[in-house]
């Protein structure tokens, strides 16, 4: 079982780059006073920290699932990652065979919970299947959301009427309270936007402009919802999605907007907020159509999802993807796990210049004004530092601001390219490119 | 963004009650903004902001680089990269901050004429900021791209020149930074370091003068003498003492000439029966010159004629003048003088031993070491080894050991020293220590921290080529599982170095 786990697959589980680094640090046997594997699904270890008692770390390979006695809120923590790396790369070091009590008890509890969860899911599914019930729920939700949207509109209007000048001094409760009301209104998308506005109000110089941008975006969404019937069906889906309505996989499967593989994984972005890890895999269809797809997955702290073949940028995978409805379909999902065809390949071909990328972005916004990010693959570019900031420059000597894993890996990227021409893939946000993958002239790959 | 946005932002900041929005713009955007004019002020502001924001998002174009700006590009490499496995080991050692393993990797890379991998450059450049050894060892294998990268980061820039501290550190840095700068400069250019020190000498406080003066011990030569001689008049006793210590090691110095003159007639040869013995004058005249040359003045309320003080004048000179000087004055060979000196009182002989170290009289030093029992040899040799040149140190040790490390009192005392010894001495030392440790473990129930610590230190310092032999030694000893489980973990750094050595082998 260790053979299917590689270093890259293990590190793909890390909630952020710092955790990946810390996990690799603990991938050395010197830090562990006890290591074991029962030959099946259980791995365990005790790692000496700063306290008197070592931290007890255990892994259930079935998911995988992690549990550690350390106080870290990250999931998996660095101990879990380190232990997993030892399992993947140094299996002979896990010498204990019989799991201790604290491991077998945990496994038993997990089995009980899984059984209960399955029973609950079956009951819920039976309830969900009733069409009359479904329609009632949908109508009820729509009513709640409409009320929430109206409340939000009034709140937003109040803010601009009174002026934003006092907002930096408002406590976070001010924002969290309104966000909570949107959660109650079953509009989590609005809640998330409002929840982050407190941070913008306290983001230092230029905060007014940044906050006004967010408010403008929120206003656009509220307006869109208010005139939903006047919008095209696909654009209605975009508005709903941003408000927080979940796009059901069953409905999207039935709609039949599908594209066949093979696909190239262009880049992978991971964002961690307090409880949720968002994993974004950008794929591009190989062949004439060259459709782009964004495969999103989320995991909660308690249950990180196992990495799959879309976790490695540069890989070629195969299988059909089904698009969620949108004015500009990007979000997609596989109905069955994709097959990995190759871990590498030729340097992919993209835009020849940034003006082409900008034109593509403008066309995308015209279709879907709510678009927040777009995939940009640009050939023949160079990274450079000008006036202490990173830029990406194309063959026409035009440039855009860039970041690499939020500045965390700027120097790694620069070391990789050496200022030489490279193919870069990233997410364009409208103001800067978040670099995710770089191919150098020899086809070597840098993953942010 | 543009002027329209600036106006909207101002209106939002103040509030629409105080500053109602009236955004305007040319072209189609302006037309769309006008269409919102009949809305309420809040709706107008938010709607206008949404329009302008989207307009900017959709219409922004990449800016043009200045025509005279050339995008910097790293030059072509002259060295080949290390193997993928070697690079993986380096990455692991960097993450674990195993500095000794990183240093070893860099040395092996230099010997094999390979360079560091690009992916490790930022971590290496950051790590080397805190270590002179790492900086020096990194430079030969940094590669063209590494140097190019270092130039682009203000925290790494100085590394490329092999210096962390640039000249500004000497001018404006902390005392610690200034000391580091002076040490690095003295290693490169002893004369320039001395000149830098002389320029600022009068402004420095006594503590700094003393610390900076100690730096001159590295690369000490007769050229330093004039400055050091002047330091004998310094108002700080610590500075004077430091200067005396350094002058004592310059045989041609005026100070040593004065001491040798005072040594004349201090000793004579007498006979007791048929045995020749050294005889000493009871005292040496005390004058201002001798006090300037470091003779401690009498204690308070002790007159200069006090017999004990007068005897101390003799021991002062004995502890400063090379034994060979006395031998020459007495007309005997050095080995004859050593035999005579041993027969003198233990106290007087101890003064002569001190003198031999101060004046670096190696023959006397050697004879003295070889006369010691094992416990005393351990203590004295380890303590004094740093003051001996490597060739003398090795020679004395070989003569003492006679091929058997078992002759020393405690082998663990030598852990710090052995890595600096030739490979044949290391090749006999480490297996011997390992066997002793393994035998102790075979008799114990639980690991003791001392043995853990010893094994960890051995794993960090043992030559990598001894790794397979080490495993054999440990495998050949019966021990409890708890020890058996510890071994791979404690020996891991050695395993890494063994693999590094293997990867860089021609």
Image (cartoon, coloured by chain):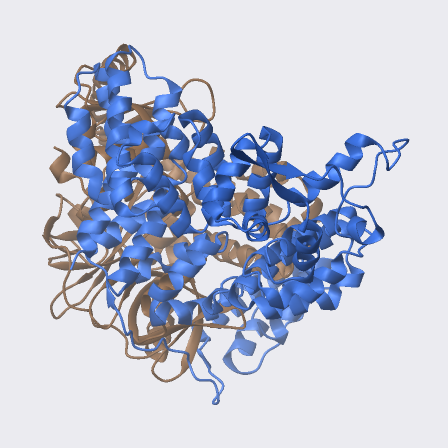
The image shows residue A435, relative to residue A1, as above or below, that is below
Q: Is residue A103 left or right of residue A254?
A: right
**Which quadrant does the N terminus of chain B fall into?**
bottom right
Q: Position of residue B459 (x, y in %)?
A: 30, 36
User: Between B321 and B21, which is closer to the camera in this rendering?
Assistant: B321
Report if residue A113 is visible in the image.
no
Q: Position of residue B61 (x, y in %)?
A: 44, 78
Q: Residue at x 36, y 46 (%)?
A: B395
**Which quadrant does the C terminus of chain B fall into?**
bottom left
Q: Is residue A61 left or right of residue B207?
A: left
Palette colour of chain B: blue
- Chain letter corresponding to the colour brown: A
The image shows residue B141, relative to residue A186, as above or below, that is below
Q: Check the image and name the residue furthest to the right.
A: B301
Q: Position of residue A197 (x, y in %)?
A: 56, 48
Q: Residue at x 77, y 58 (%)?
A: B204
């Amino acid at each position: 079982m260790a053979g299917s786990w590689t270093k890259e697959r293990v590190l793909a589980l890390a909630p952020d780059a710092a955790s990946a680094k810390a996990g690799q640090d603990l991938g050395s046997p010197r830090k562990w006073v006890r290591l074991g594997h029962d030959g099946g699904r259980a791995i365990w270890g005790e790692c000496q920290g700063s306290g008197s008692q070592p931290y007890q770390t255990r892994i259930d390979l079935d998911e995988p699932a992690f549990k550690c006695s350390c106080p870290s809120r990250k999931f998996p923590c660095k101990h879990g990652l380190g232990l997993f790396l030892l399992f993947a790369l140094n299996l002979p070091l896990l010498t204990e065979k019989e799991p201790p009590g604290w491991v077998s008890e945990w496994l038993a509890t997990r089995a009980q919970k899984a059984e209960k969860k399955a029973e609950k899911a079956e009951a819920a599914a039976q309830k969900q299947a009733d069409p009359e019930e479904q329609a009632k729920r949908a109508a009820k939700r729509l009513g709640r959301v409409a009320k929430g949207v109206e409340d939000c509109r009034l709140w937003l209007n109040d803010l601009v009427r009174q002026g934003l000048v006092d907002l930096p001094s408002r406590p976070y409760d001010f924002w969290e309270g309104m966000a909570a009301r949107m959660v109650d209104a079953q509009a989590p998308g609005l809640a998330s936007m409002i929840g982050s506005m407190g941070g913008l109000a306290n983001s230092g110089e230029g905060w007014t402009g940044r906050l006004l941008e967010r408010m403008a975006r929120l206003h656009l969404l509220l307006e869109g919802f208010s005139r939903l019937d006047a919008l095209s069906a696909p654009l209605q889906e975009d508005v709903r999605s941003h408000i927080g309505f979940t796009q059901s996989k069953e409905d999207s499967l039935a709609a039949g907007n599908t594209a066949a593989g093979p696909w190239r994984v262009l880049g992978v972005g991971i964002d961690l907020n307090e409880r949720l890890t968002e994993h974004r895999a950008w794929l591009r269809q190989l062949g004439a159509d060259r459709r782009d797809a964004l495969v999103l997955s989320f995991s909660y702290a308690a249950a990180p999802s196992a990495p799959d073949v879309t976790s490695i940028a540069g890989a070629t995978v195969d299988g059909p993807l089904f698009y969620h409805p949108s004015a500009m379909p990007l979000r997609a999902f596989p109905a069955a796990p994709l097959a990995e065809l190759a871990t590498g390949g030729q340097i992919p071909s993209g835009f020849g210049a940034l003006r082409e990328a900008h034109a593509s972005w403008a066309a995308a916004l015209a279709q879907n004004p709510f678009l927040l990010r777009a995939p940009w693959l640009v050939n023949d570019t160079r990274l450079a530092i000008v006036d202490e900031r990173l830029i990406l420059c194309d063959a026409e000597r035009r440039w855009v601001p860039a970041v690499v894993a939020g500045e965390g890996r700027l120097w790694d990227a620069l070391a990789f390219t050496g200022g030489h021409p490279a193919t870069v893939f990233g997410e364009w946000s409208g103001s800067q490119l978040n670099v995710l993958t770089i191919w150098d002239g020899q086809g070597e790959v840098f993953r942010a | 963004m543009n002027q329209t946005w600036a106006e909207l932002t101002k209106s939002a900041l103040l509030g629409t009650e105080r500053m109602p929005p009236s955004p305007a713009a040319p072209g189609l955007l302006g037309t769309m903004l006008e269409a919102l004019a009949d809305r309420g002020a809040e709706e107008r502001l938010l709607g206008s902001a949404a329009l302008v924001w989207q307009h900017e998002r959709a219409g922004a174009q990449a800016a043009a680089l200045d025509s005279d700006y050339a995008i910097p590009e790293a030059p072509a490499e002259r060295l080949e990269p290390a193997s993928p496995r070697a690079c993986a080991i380096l990455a692991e050692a960097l993450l674990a901050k195993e500095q000794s393993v990183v240093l070893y990797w860099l040395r092996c890379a230099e010997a094999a004429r390979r360079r560091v991998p690009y992916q490790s450059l930022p971590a290496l450049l950051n790590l080397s900021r805190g270590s002179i050894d790492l900086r020096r060892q990194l430079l030969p294998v940094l590669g063209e791209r590494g140097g190019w990268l270092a130039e682009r980061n203000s925290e790494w820039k100085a590394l490329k020149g092999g210096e962390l501290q640039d000249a500004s550190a000497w001018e404006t840095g902390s005392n610690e930074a200034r000391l580091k700068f002076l040490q690095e400069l003295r290693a490169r250019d002893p004369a320039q370091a001395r000149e830098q020190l002389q320029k600022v000498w009068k402004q420095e406080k006594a503590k700094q003068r003393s610390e900076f003066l100690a730096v001159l011990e590295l690369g000490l030569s007769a050229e330093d003498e004039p400055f050091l001689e002047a330091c004998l008049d310094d108002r700080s006793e610590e500075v004077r003492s430091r200067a005396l210590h350094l002058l004592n090691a310059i045989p041609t110095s005026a100070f040593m000439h004065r001491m040798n003159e005072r040594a004349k007639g201090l000793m004579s040869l007498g006979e007791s029966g048929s045995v020749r013995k050294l005889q000493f004058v009871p005292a040496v005249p005390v004058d201002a010159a001798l006090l300037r040359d470091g003779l401690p003045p009498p204690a308070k309320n002790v007159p200069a004629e006090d017999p004990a003080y007068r005897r101390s004048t003799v021991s002062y000179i004995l502890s400063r003048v090379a034994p060979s000087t006395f031998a020459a004055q007495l007309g005997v060979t050095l080995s004859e003088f050593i035999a005579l000196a041993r027969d003198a009182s233990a106290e007087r002989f101890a003064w002569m031993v001190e003198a031999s170290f101060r004046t670096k009289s190696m023959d006397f030093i050697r004879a003295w070491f070889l006369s010691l029992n094992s416990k005393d040899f351990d203590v004295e040799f380890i303590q004094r080894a740093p003051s001996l040149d490597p060739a003398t140190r090795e020679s004395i040790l070989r003569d003492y050991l006679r091929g058997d490390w078992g002759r020393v009192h405690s082998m663990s005392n030598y852990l710090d020293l052995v890595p600096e010894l030739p490979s044949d001495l290391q090749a006999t030392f480490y297996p011997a220590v390992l066997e002793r440790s393994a035998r102790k473990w075979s008799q114990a129930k639980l690991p003791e921290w001392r043995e853990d610590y010893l094994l960890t230190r051995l794993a960090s310092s043992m030559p990598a080529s001894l790794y397979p032999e080490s495993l054999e030694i440990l495998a050949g000893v019966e021990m409890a599982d708890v020890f058996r489980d510890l071994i791979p973990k404690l020996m891991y750094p050695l395993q890494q170095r063994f693999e590094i050595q293997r990867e860089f082998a021609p």
